[in-house]
Image: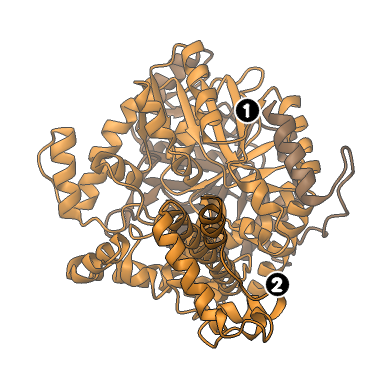
Amino acid sequence: MPRESVLHKVRTALARKVGQPPAPAPPPRLSIPELEPQARWERFARALEKLGGKAQRVSSPAEAGRAVAALIGDRPAVASEAPYLAQCGIPRLPSVQSGFRDPAALRAACAAAEFGITSADYALADTGTLVIASSPREPRLISLLPPVHVAVLPAERLLTGLDELLALAPAPAERTSALVLITGPSRTADIEQILVRGVHGPGQIHVIVVDGRETTG
Amino acid sequence: MTPLYQINIRKTLADAHLEEAIYAATARLMDHRRQVVGPQALPDYQELREQARRIKQHTLENLDAYLEQFEAQVQARGGVVVWARDGGEAADFLLELARRKQARLIVKSKSMTTEEIGLRERLEQHHLETVETDLGEYIIQLAQERPYHIVAPALHKTRYEVGEIFRRRLGVPEETVPEKQTKIARRVLRQKFLAADIGVTGANFLVADSGAVVLVENEGNARLTTSAPRIHVALAGIEKLIPRAQDLAVFLKLLGRSATGQPLTVYTSLLAGPRREGELDGPEEFYVVLLDNGRTRVLADRDKRQSLYCIRCGACLNHCPVYRRIGGHNYPWVYSGPIGKIISPQFQGLMQDPWLPFASSLCAACAEVCPVKIEIPRLLLELRAEIVKTWRRERQKRLERWAFRLWAWAMRRPRIYEMLALAAGALMGEEAGRGWLAKAPALLNAGPLRAWFSQRDLPPPGRTFRQLWRTRTARVR
C-alpha cells in the first residue's frame, strides 16, 4: 500500500512512532496595525489603483446601485445573490441576470456577460485585495469569466491586511469550499516580461465601497 | 572529449540574443523583488524569513502527523487523498480516474511537481488530451520544450518566436504584440476550460488544519482549472504541508514578493473539498495526490533535509550569476538554478550529473535572497564532498578490477606466467636468505605497494612449483 509505505518511510526518516503527536508548533505570527477607517479606505484605493483597478467610494447602498447602473449601462451583466447586492438594488437593474438555480445556465450567462457583479466578505487595505468566500449565493464564476469584475461592499468590511483576515477567520475551510483572494485584474508577464491584463480572469476590476453608517437604500 | 553539457553551455553563451533575454528578464525580476522587501516596504522581512524557516523545519520534523491530519481534514470535507510513491503511481491514478470517468480532456495549471514526473507526457502517451493553461507554460507546451524558469517558463522566448509558435501550432495569423497574443491564448483556452472533464493543479501549500490546497497565481487559470471542470486533482509533494491556515500570513507575504515582487499575487485560492450543498460551481469531486518520489530519502538526511523547505519562488535563479549566463535549459533536470543544483543530485542520484554542484562560484547570493533561508552554498559544498568521496571509491574499485584482469590474463598463459614468476623470484632472490619480503627492492617498495608490504610479509621465494615438478618428473624418468 503506497499510503503505509510513504508514511513508514517518513517515520523512519524522522525516527517517529505511529500515532506520535507533533511537537508544539511555533506560535503563528500575526501583526495587526491600528488603522482608522478613513486611512484604510485610502490605503485600499491607492493599492488597487496601483494595480490598474478602480476604487470608488459612495455614501449609501442606493448610490452604489446607481453607480453600478451607470457603469454597466445596458450591457449584459451577471450578479450574485449576495444579500448586500440586493440591499443596493443591483439584481433588479434591467440588464442584470441573477438568481440562477441551474449550473449550466449560470456558466452560460457568465461566459456571455460583460460584467460580473459580486460582493466581498472582506477587503484588505494593504494590498487592495478582495476576499470572497464561495457559497451558493456567491458562485466562483461570476468574478472569473466576465471581462469586468465589479464588487460592492460596505466600508466596515475593510481590514488592514492578510494578518487581520487570518485572525478573524483562522479556519476559513470550515465556512467555504473556496476562499479566494483577488488582488487587482488578472495579469501576466509571461511574454518578454511585458505586463498584459486580462489573461483568463477579468482584465478590469472595479470596487465600490459603501460608507457603513447607512444600511438602507 | 568535451562533455555534452559543456557543448550546450557554450552554445548558450554564444547566443547573444538569448543571453540578453535571460539577463534582462532576471534583472527585472530582481528589481521588482528589491522594491518590496526593503526596510521601508516590509520592515519585518527578516523576521518573516526566520518564521517561515522555523515553520518549515517544524513541519518536516513532524511530517507524518501533519500528513495524517491533512488527510483526515480532506476526507471530512468529502475529498479523497491518494498516496503515490513515485511519478508512475501518480500518473496511473490519473489515467485510471480518467478512464473511469470517461474523461477526454484535461486542463492543467502550472506545477513544477507535474513537470518533475513528466505527467503531461505520460497522459498524452495514453491519448488523453492535456492542455497547459498558464500562458508561459502553454507556449512551452506548443513549442515542445521544458520550462526555462520555475516561475517564468517561457522567459527565453521573444514575442516574435511566440508569434511564430502560435501561427504554426494554432493556425492563427502571425501576431507579435503580447497583448494580442494573450487574447489569442485566452480565446483558445477558454474553450478548453469549458469543455474539460478534469482540472489538474499542483499546490503551493497544503494546510494541515484545514485540509486545504492553496494555489497562488496571476492569470486566473488555476481558478478556472479548479472551478469549471467537474473533477479537481491536486498533485503535491509531501513537503508542501504547513500546519495552520494562519501560517499563510507569513508564506504568502514572502512567496509573491520573492517570486515576482508582488505583495500578494492576483489570485490566492484556498480550496477545501468539492463544492458544497447548494453551490452551483466548483468541482463535484476533489482529489489530492500526495507524492513521495524521493522526498522521504531527502527527509532522512538531517542536514540536507532543509532542501525540502523550498517554496519554488525562483528568487535564487534570478540572482544567480551562473543561471543568468547559462539559462534554464543547461541544467539536467526540471529544477534549474541554485535550488536545482542541490535537489537534482538528491532526487536523481549523486552521480547522475556529478558536475552540477561544482558549477557554482559559491557567491551565496541565493542564500541571501531565499525566503526560507536554505543554506544553498553550504549544501553545495557537502554535495561536492560526497561526490569526491564516491569518485575516489569508484576509482579504487577500477584499479582493483584492472589488477585482477591482468592477473587472469597471465594465469591463462602458462609460459608467460612462469616467466613472470621467475622474474619476480629473481627480483627478490637477492634478498633470499637475508630476510623477508619486507626488505624487497625499492622497485616493489614504493607507492601504494609500500603500504601493503609494511603490514604483510612472506618468506623469501625458493624454487617455483613448476621447477620442482620438472625436477621430479626427470628423476622418475
Q: Is residue B320 visible?
A: yes
- Return the x and y of residue B396 as percentages of the image width and height: 54, 66
Q: Which residue is mark 1?
A: A135
Image point 67% across, 40% down: which residue?
A: A215
Circle 1 chain = A
Chain B hue?
orange
- Look at 49% across and 63% down and name the residue there: B403
Locate the C terminus of chain A by quadrant: top right
Callout 1 crowding tier (Cα within 10 Å): few <14, some 14–19, many ≥20: many
Q: Residue B32 at what x, y percent from top left? A: 43, 69
Nearest to the observer: residue B46 or residue B451: B451
- Whole-angstrom CA distance, mark 1 to mark 2, is 36 Å
Secondary structure at numbered mark 1: loop
Identify the chain drawn in brown.
A
Q: Nearer the viewer, residue A122 or B229?
A: B229
Disc 2 marks which residue? B47
Question: Percent x, y for residue B429?
Answer: 56, 80
Query: In what element is the residue under mark 2?
Result: helix
**Frontmost residue, A164 versus B351:** B351
Q: Is residue B319 visible?
A: no
Q: Is residue A32 above or below residue A171?
A: below
Direction from residue A29 to residue B277 in the image, left or right: left
